[in-house]
Amino acid sequence: MKISLCLPHSLTHFAILWHCDLVESKLEIYCKVCRLRGLRQSMGKNAFLDFPLPLFFCKRWDILNSPLVSYSVSALRSLIQTLLAFSNATTTNSKIWRYKMISLKNAYEILLSQKHTNPIEEIDIFHSLGKILAEDIIATRNLPAFSNSAMDGYVVSEIAGSYKITHTILAGDTPPHTIPQGECYKIMTGAKTPSNALSVIPFENARQEGEVMIPSQEIKPQANIKLEGEECKKGEVLLRKGEKLTYRTLSLVASEGIGSLKVFTPLKIAIYSSGNEVVELGSKASEEQIYNINGIAYHSLLSSYGFEANYKGILSDELEGIREEVRKFRDYDVIFTSGGASVGEADFFERALREEGAEILFHGINLKPGRPMLVGKMGETFIFSLPGNPLSGMLNLITLALPSLFALSGATSTLPCSIKAKNKRAFSLKSGRSNMILGSFDGEFFEAYRGGKYGSGSILPIKESNSIALFDERVEGVNEGEQIKILPLPFELKNGEKLLDWVNFVE
């Protein structure tokens, strides 16, 4: 089997073109230096495996018999894993490219089209906040159930210059059926009004002289009276299946006297981190190690949107260890991993997924940050392998995974709801890919964090920003004062059919 690899050097306009032959179980490598521009034209814009290799020259080395002292250990390991992953290929002279990337639009189309069987459970209304309603709620009585006073004041049945006060109606009282001519009743907020009530005059708009009330302002018919059924009539739909239950919607449900609700059982979610260099919080990290940022970042981010997740630890870097953990994925509805989605790191993880029968829905999005994202499905379990860089992983979770999670939860509102803002300072973008830009929104202007110039491994930008702007592949920059769409953090979700309504396109 013959394999061709193209490894661009990040500091030059050249690339190392490798030709690797598998001969009698040995990998033989040849390389030469080529101009990057020519390779892009002949091999395709994204046809590169992006390893951090030093630029050097050689004629031929045998991987198994030579020390290859010019390689870093991690680069060599990544290269070998990539070659071995394809060692069982059936075609000869096959070229290995970077995983085929899909567009941001295609990623959303795939994610939002996935179906999931959601069990239904009945729970107490006091435990239903944040859950997804599994049935329509139909009004069994009018809302309000009876006409009542919206103010403390005097209820009258006609317009006159003065009225005799003959009765007082408190909230919860059964009032007299009608108000006699020339009379009025004192009435408290929420109290039921007599059948011939015309208007309620607030106490502050009248004066009382003994047992007589004299209005001080013009009387307007139906003023300060909430009419029976004016909000919702018996038999109408109060809430629809798929709505997320909030304090606003639950108060509406409570108005019907409903004490329990049928909801979709929440998704069972697990979170894994990965990487030999990652150590758990509370341990002591060496100079070469980093703390596990992604575990707590994903967990808290999901919690802030109403999803409960279990943190399961750091995945093994060994194939058998990954296999063992992947077999447990079926115990969950959704799996999140951080790291293991970029080329080289992903070989064992994706291999283990495939061996366990997983279908890879896509691997790689033409997006920055957040390109190395893998999404797969193993039975009823969905797997999101997000980039290891904290910023990339969190942005992918916010903009791509969250809408998908709501769709899998049975929610009808799954599309991010954007708002419009004026761009404060001009900034440029690299066209040919979609871009996500963090920034601050002050109610009128959006300002890109550091002009959009920050690394995907940064942490501070997510803390200093309160909004995200997404741009299509053709957008090359944004002018000062230009109106753009942004997603405030946290953003609301809406029900709609217009995909990518929250993304900025070239007009």
Image (tube, helix red, strand yellow):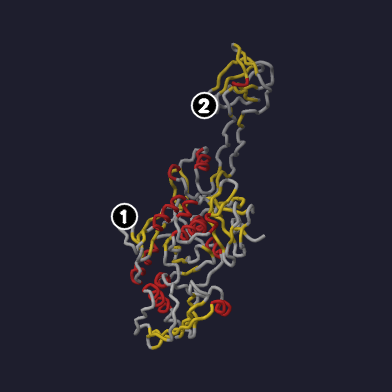
Count of marks, rendered view: 2
- Can see residue 461? yes
Q: Which residue is mark 2?
A: 172
Where disc 2 sits, the SS reads: loop
Q: Is residue 374 left or right of residue 497?
A: left
Q: Residues within 10 Å of mark 2 (few under 14, many from 20)?
A: few
Q: Amino acid at mark 1?
A: Gly
For the view shown, which residue lies furthest in the left direction?
Answer: 284
Residue toward you, 25 or 454: 454
Residue at image x 34%, y 81%? 67
Q: Position of residue 374 (x, y in %)?
A: 47, 66
Q: Position of residue 451 (x, y in %)?
A: 55, 57
Q: Amino acid at mark 2?
A: Gly
Where disc 1 sits, the SS reads: loop
Q: Earlier in the sequence, mark 1 or mark 2?
A: 2
Residue toward you, 193 or 267: 267
137 relative to 66, above or below: above
Q: Which mark is residue 328?
A: none
Q: Which residue is mark 1?
A: 282
Q: Is residue 282 left or right of residue 308?
A: left
Quadrant containing the C terminus is bottom right
- Can see residue 380? no
Mark 1 and mark 2 residues within 8 Å of each other at the beta carbon: no
Residue at image x 49%, y 56%? 398
Mark 1 vs mark 2, CA separation in Å: 58 Å
Q: Position of residue 72 (x, y in %)?
A: 38, 74
Foreground mark, 1 or 2, reads: 1
357 relative to 463, above or below: below
Q: Quadrant of residue 1?
A: bottom left
Q: Residues within 10 Å of mark 1 (few under 14, many from 20)?
A: few
24 relative to 422, above or below: below
